[in-house]
Image: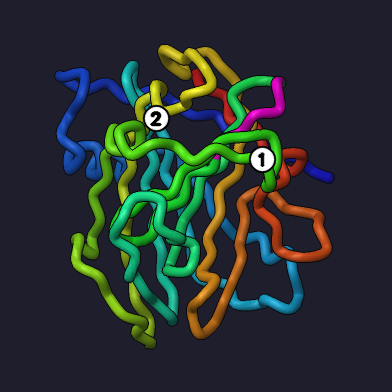
């Protein structure tokens, strides 16, 4: 199956850990943009509009999701809650060829579920102190939102320090190539959906398939 490749470029700031609002604004202007458009399973045809802007600094991997959808929910507020039941965006990444990959899943509030392992069934959840190192800012704010219908647009900016990848020792992604995929889902929305950046060739929805990851080259 075809594997997408993407060049991710470095952004320079005047401080090692710039304000997350400044990061969000720079990603609007200077990030590498991709679209999450693959509808892999015919029984889930709904296709919200999803764009991701990517970049990195010496200290953090930077992502910004731009989403427009017709069913929206953001109820989960505790770390490692099942955020995939809400309006959810996800970043799965494999730093090397050991087979270990990380799933980072966020609802629109920025609530994060994170784990690591070699497949869906043998995963270790990241501890709260690890996940708290990930910085986010959402256009929705932090208060829970019950499901609403009608066109709704939101953004989520995420700054991920390499030390959260707790099975690896990564100082910076610069010069590295990482296998990854980007997803949008909403398991418990009135219109469930499962989109990916790189196509997933499984019979049923399954994001935990690193053999279908694309490639990110950090230059």
Magenta stretch, main secondary structure class: loop
Q: Is residue 25 magenta?
A: no
**Horizontal and vertical percent for residue 94?**
61, 30
Q: Toward the viewer: 55 or 211?
A: 211
Q: Left of 16 or right of it: where is 56?
A: right
Location of residue 174 with respect to 75 vertically, above or below: above
User: Which residue is labeled 1 in the image?
Assistant: 122
**What is the quadrant of the N terminus in the image?**
top right
**Circle 1 Cα neighbour tier, 10 Å, few/some/many (<14 / 14–19 / ≥20):** few
N-terminal label among 1 and 2? 2
- Quadrant housing residue 195: bottom right
Q: Toward the viewer: 97 or 79?
A: 79
**Horizontal and vertical percent for residue 11?**
32, 25
**Circle 2 Cα neighbour tier, 10 Å, few/some/many (<14 / 14–19 / ≥20):** many
Magenta part of the protein: which range?
98-102
- Quadrant housing residue 147: bottom left
Seen at 67% across and 76% down, the residue is 44
- SS category of the residue bearing label 2: strand
**Residue 61 marker:** 2
**Residue 57 marker:** none
- Quadrant housing residue 196: bottom right
Q: Left of 56 or right of it: where is 199?
A: right
Seen at 66% across and 60% down, the residue is 38
- SS category of the residue bearing label 1: loop
**Horizontal and vertical percent for residue 17?**
20, 24
Q: Left of 79 or right of it: where is 201?
A: right
Q: Left of 144 or right of it: where is 111?
A: right
- How many marks overall? 2
């Amino acid at each position: 199956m075809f594997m997408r490749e993407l060049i991710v470029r470095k952004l320079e700031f005047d401080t090692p850990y710039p304000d997350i609002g400044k990061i969000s604004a720079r990603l609007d202007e200077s990030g590498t943009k991709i679209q999450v458009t693959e509808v892999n399973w015919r029984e889930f045809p709904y296709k919200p509009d999803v764009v991701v802007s990517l970049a990195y600094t010496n200290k953090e991997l930077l992502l910004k999701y731009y989403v427009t959808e017709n069913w929206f929910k953001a109820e989960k507020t505790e770390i490692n809650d099942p955020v995939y039941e809400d309006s959810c965006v996800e970043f799965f990444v494999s730093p090397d060829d050991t087979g270990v990959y990380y799933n980072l899943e966020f609802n629109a509030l920025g609530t994060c579920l994170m784990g690591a392992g070699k497949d869906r069934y043998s995963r270790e959840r990241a501890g709260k102190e690890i996940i708290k190192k990930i910085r986010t800012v959402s256009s929705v704010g932090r208060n829970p939102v019950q499901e609403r219908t009608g066109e709704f647009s939101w953004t989520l900016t995420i700054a991920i320090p390499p030390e959260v990848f707790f099975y690896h020792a990564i100082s910076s992604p610069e010069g590295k190539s990482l296998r990854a995929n980007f997803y949008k889902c909403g398991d418990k929305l009135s219109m469930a959906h499962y989109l990916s950046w790189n196509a997933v060739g499984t019979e049923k929805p399954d994001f935990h398939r690193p053999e279908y990851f694309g490639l990110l080259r950090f230059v």
